[in-house]
Amino acid sequence: MERNSPARIRELELMATKIRRNVLDICMQRGGYAGQGVALADIAACLYFDEMRPDNNNWYHDRFVLSNGHDAIMTYGALAEQGSYTMEELRTYNADGTKVDQSPIEGQFGFEITAGSLGQGPSQAAGIAYAERLKGSDKRIYCLFSDGELQEGNVWEAAMFAGHQKLSNLVYIIDNNDLQATGATKDVLGVEPVPEKFETFGFGAKRINGNSIAEILEAFEEARNTADKPFVIVCDTLIFAGVDCIQAVLPNAHYVAKASADWQAGLQELEERISKC
Amino acid sequence: MLLTSKPVIDKAPFDHISFDLCSRRKDVMLMSADLSKYTQIIRVKKELPDQHLDVGMAEQNLISVAAGVSKAGYVPIATTFACYATRRAYDQMMICMGTGPNTNVVIGFTPGIANPARIHHQAAEDLGMIRAIPNATVIDPMDVTDFKQALDVAVDIPGLVYLRGHRGDTPVLLDDNKFKFELGKTYPLRTGSGVGIIATGHATQWALEASVLLEQKGVEHSLLHVPTIKPVNETEISDYCFAHDQIVTIENHNIVTGLGSLVTEIVSDIGRGPRITRLGIPDVWAPGGTLPYIRSQLALDAPSLAKKIEAVCNGA
C-alpha cells in the first residue's frame, strides 16, 4: 500500500481516532492536557505508525524527542496502541505516586529527555542528530514542541546550530495552536511568521493543517527528501480537534482539571466512529 | 609525600590534558561556546576535529546540545567559563544533564577570582549551585596533576559532573607518580597538631603558600586538600575536623555554600565540634584585576592568610 494512498490515510485516521479515545479515557480519571492530546492525535498516528521506522525490538529505529512535556499525553495515547503501555497503567496518569508522569522524566519508557522545562528539547534533539550523523547512523530525529515554546531563547540557539550544521536528519514538529498558559500566543507574545523564521535559520519549512493526515504524510515526505538542511513542520492545530462536542465547550483549554459530562458523549462519539470502521 | 619536590609551571594545561584524553578515548567529544582559545583547546581542535564541536556563543545551547550528544553514545565535555556554565545555563545543567544516567561533563574555567573581569566573569557561587543538584558530582582540582587525573575519572561517572578548570600558568604541585585521584577522597598535604586547614582548588595552592609562612613562624598546623566537593567523604572530613580544636577552611569561592559551608554542615550534624573559620570570598563583589591584587584585597594573599590562621591559633 502506498504511504499516502486513500486506504492508508483511512487506516491512519482510524488510528488517530483510537488515540483520541485513549487520551479522553486517560484524562477522564483526573484531568490533564487532554485538549493537546486530542489535537495531536493525527500527528501521533502518522509519527508512530507510519513515519518512524521500527527496530527489531518492538520499538523504533528513529528517535522522537518530546520537548514540551505536557504533550506526553499524545505519546501515551499512541503507545497504548503500540503496546508499550496498557490502558490500566495509563489511567494512573496524574495520580499521586504514578509512574505515568504528566511531564515525563528521562528514563521513563518512551521518553528521551526530561521535558518539563520548555525550550530544551530542540537543542537536545539537535545534539542527538549531530552525534548520530557523526557515527554514520541513518537514524532520523523528530522533536515536537509548541508555538508558545518558541518564546524561549534556547529554541533559537538550537535552530541556529541545526541550520549551521545542516542537520538533514532532524525534523522539528511545532504544535502551532495559538494557545499558551495564559492566553492566545498572538496576544501574549506573537511568534509568527514561524516557517519564515526557521527558513532564515537554514531550515526547510512547511506550514500544514496538523489535523490532516494527508498533509502530515506529505510534509514528512518532503522533510525526508530535503537534503543538506533540517526541516520544520509547522502544524496548525485546534484544541480538542476531532471531538466536536468537547471542542464546542472547551475550545481554549490549556489544561482540564476535571472532565465534564460532555466527555462521556465525546468518548461515545469516538467509540462509534471506531466501531464503524 | 604527595607533593613534588620541585614544582614547575605548566603554561597551557588543558591543551595537553584534552589532547591526551581525546587521543585515548574516541567516544569523548570536547565542546566549546566560542571560548576554545581561552580555555586552551588547541591540539584537539586542530588534530582531532571530529572530537571538537563549537556551538557558538550560546551556553544554554552548549549544555543542551551536549546532553543530546550524550544520548547518542558520546561523552561530552562542555567547556566554558564557570560563570557562563553555571549562571547562564544552570537549568540546562540540572534538567538536561542532571536527571539522566548518561555521563555529562562540564568544565568551568577561570572560577572564582581566577578571572580578572569583576563580577560578571567571576563565578564565586558555582560550587554551591551545582552541589545543590541531587546526584551531581563536583570537583575542584588544585593543580595540573589533580585536574588531569580528575578528568580521567570524570568521563566514567554517570550523570552531571562539574569540574573547575585551570588555564594559563598553572603549577604542577602533586607528584603524578604518588598522587592518585579518587572520587570523594581527601588528601593530607601536611600533618600536625594545632590548626587544621582544609582547602580546595586554587585555594589549596594559597594554603600551601601560607603554610610556608606559618612554618617559618612556628605555628603548628596541618593541611587537608579536598578536591571532591560532592560526593564528599564525610567520615574523612569529620575525622580530620574532630582531631583539631580549630579548623580554617580556604576556598576560591563565596564562603556561603562552598567548602566552608560543607565542612560546617558535616561537623554540625555531629555536634560539639571544633570552631570553624571560613576564609574565601566574604560574600561581597570581588574586585577585578590581577589575581595577586584581588587576593590581597580580599585578604587571601599568603601573608594575610597566615596572619589570620595564626590569630585563630591564638584564640582570636
Image: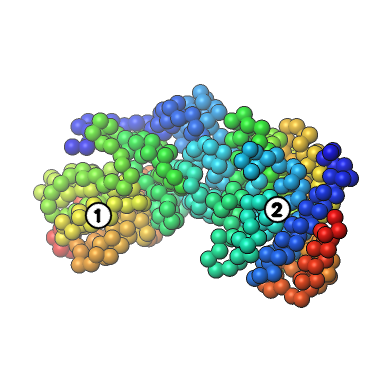
Three-letter amino acid code of the residue under disc 2: Glu
Q: Residue at x 54, y 44 (%)?
A: B67
- Left or right of residue A220: residue B223: left
Image point (83%, 69%), residue name:
A245
Pointer 2 and pointer 1 on the same chain = no
Residue at the image position 60 percent from the left and 31 percent from the top: A134
Q: In the rendering, at what x and y percent does residue A193 appear?
A: 80, 51
Which picture quadrant has residue A254? Answer: bottom right
Residue B70 is situated, as x and y percent measured from the top left of the image, at 53, 41
Quadrant for the C terminus of chain B in the image? bottom left
How crowded pointer 1 is (Cα within 10 Å; few <14, some 14-19, many 20+) is rated as: few
Q: CA distance from mark 2 to mark 1?
A: 52 Å
Front residue of A109/B193: it is A109
Label 1 marks a residue whose chain is B
Mark 2 belongs to chain: A
SS at badge 1? helix
Q: Give the crowd class for mark 2: few <14, some 14-19, many >=20 residues within 10 Å.
A: some
Which residue is labeled 1 in the image? Answer: B235
Residue A274 visible in rendering: yes
x and y, in percent, of residue B101 in the image: 48, 47
Question: Label for residue A81?
Answer: 2
**In the image, is residue B71 above or below residue B243?**
above
**Is label 2 in contact with label 1 (beta carbons under 8 Å)?**
no
Helix, strand or loop at label 2? It is helix
Say left or right for A184 vs B235. right
The answer to whether residue A117 of the structure is visible from this angle is no
Quarter of the N terminus of chain B within the rendering: top left
For badge 1, the amino acid type reads Thr
Asked if B35 appears above or below A29 in the picture, the reply is above
The number of discs equals: 2
